[in-house]
Image (cartoon, coloured by chain):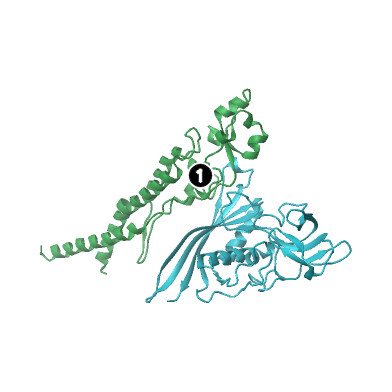
Chain colours: A cyan, B green
Amino acid sequence: MELIRKLNLSLYYNLKYNILSNYIEEESSNLDLNPISGLYEPSYSYTPNAGGRGRGVYPFDTVGSGIFASCLEGDYIKVYHSTGQIPSTDYNIDYNTPGVTLISGTSVPVMFEYKWNYVSVIDEWPYVNIPDLPFLLLDWKKFNTEGFQLGGGKKHICDLDIHIFGSSKPELDDLTYVVHSGLYNKCLTLFGFSGGDVFSWGGTFNSSFDCSCDDGVSNLELNDVEVNYLKLPIDFKTDLNAYRSKVSLKIFAYTEA
Amino acid sequence: MSRQLKKLLIKNLVVDVRTRIGPGIIKQVMSKFEVELIGKVTLKDPSAPEHFKDDFFSMLSRQLESDIIITDSNITFFLGDKEELGYSGVINSPLQTMVFIIEGILGEYAFISRDIYSSVRPSAEISLGRWSGGFLITKEAFFKEGWSKKVSWEKARWGFSNTGPINVFDIDNSFISEMIDYSIKRTINEFASIIRSKHGKK
C-alpha cells in the first residue's frame, strides 16, 4: 500500500472510529436469509441504518479507545437462533453489507446485536449511490511533494476538504464542531496497513490486519483547519444539499532521506 | 535594510500587486472559470455562469483595490472574499449561485423554465422565485408532479446536477515569485539611482 492510500485510510478511520465515536450506535435487528448472497441480513425499520454506504458494523470491542481499539476483531457481537445464542465460531460477520454467514452448525440466525456508524463516511464524491443523511465526504484535492532539509528528505503536502451533509441545522452544527475540534491543532497517526485494510474483500475482518504505525514517514501534521458553511438558496432547501458545511485542511508528512 | 529602501520596496510591491500580480491571478481564475463553467447549461437558464461572469470579474477587481498587508515575510491581499460570495449568509446574489456550483451539488435536478411551467400549468399563476426565469426541482419531483408529461427528463435536466467541486481558484502561482523578484530588482535599481543622484554621480 502506498503513501496516498495510507493517508486516506488513516484519516478515514480516524473520522469514523475516533472523532465520530459518539455517533456509534447500539442496535439489534432481526435477520432474514438473502437467498442470492447466502447472507443473513438485518431487516431495518429505520433510516439511516447500518446497511447504507459508508456505515456498516463496528468491528472492535471498545468504542472510543483510539482509532483502532485493537488489531484484533472484537467478539462483542451476539447472534441468536430462536432459543439462544449461536457460538461465535459458527459464523462470520460481513461488516460492510452487513450480515452473518454461517460457517458451521445448523442453527438458523434470527437476530443479532451490533454497533454501527450513524454517520456515513465516504472517500469520494458520490456520483452514484448517495448515502442517506447525515454523511461526511472526503474530497482529496491535491497531493504534492517538496524537498525537506539538505540531503533528500521529503515533505508531502495534501490538500483536502471534508464536506459535511446534515439532515437538520442542529445536526450539522454538532457534526461540524465535532469534526473541526477533532482535527484542529492535532497530529494524526499514519498507519502502515502492512497486512492490508481492516476488512477483506467480502466485508469480513482481515485476519492479517496490522494496526502499527508507519515507521518510514512522520506523523501527519494537520494545518489550516477551517470551517465554512454553505448557505444554499431556497431552491435546494428541501433536499440533501440543504444543510452543508465544509472543513478544509492541509496535511503535512515528512520522510527522512 | 535602510528605512528608505524598505519604504521604496513596500511602495513598489503595492503597485506591482495592484497592476501585475493581482491582475495575473484574476486572469488565471477567469480563464479557469471559462473552461470549467461556461457552456455547460443553456443561456435560458438563469443559473448559467455566463450570466454572472461579469459580476464575478468585477468583484475580484474591486477586492484588489482593498488593503494589501506587507510584513517582513508575507504579502497578503484578498481575492474571492467568502463573505461577498455569500458563504456565510443567505444574500441571494447571482454570485451565490456560482458558489453552489463550484462547491459541488449532489443529486439530479430539472430546471423548470417559464416555457415548461406554462405548458404544464397554463392557467396557474407563475411564481418563479428568486431566479425569475425558472426554478430547480429534484428528479423525484419532476416525475411525481407530472412535468415529464410535457418535457423529457433529458431536456429538462439541469447541467450542473451531481457535479463535484470545481476549484476555479486553484491556479498556477509560480509566476508570483518571479514578479516579486522583479519588484525587488526594480527597487534596488531605483534606490541605487537615488543614491547616485544624491551624491552627484551619473
Q: Which residue is depicted at the point 71% across and 57% down?
A: A50
Q: Which is nearer the eye, A101 or B130?
A: A101
Residue B76 image position (x, y, % from top left): 39, 59
Taking B170 as reference, is B100 left or right? right
In this view, B16 is above or below B154: below
In this orientation, does residue A234 appear? no
Q: Residues within 10 Å of mark 1 (few under 14, many from 20)?
A: many
Location of the N terminus of chain A (image quadrant): bottom right
Taking A256 as reference, is A1 left or right? right
- The amino acid type found where label 1 is placed reads Gln
In this view, A251 is above or below A48: below
Taking A42 as reference, is A253 left or right? left
Q: Which residue is depicted at the point 62% across and 62% down?
A: A178
Residue B37 image position (x, y, % from top left): 45, 43
Q: Chain of mark 1?
A: B
Residue A91 image position (x, y, % from top left): 77, 66
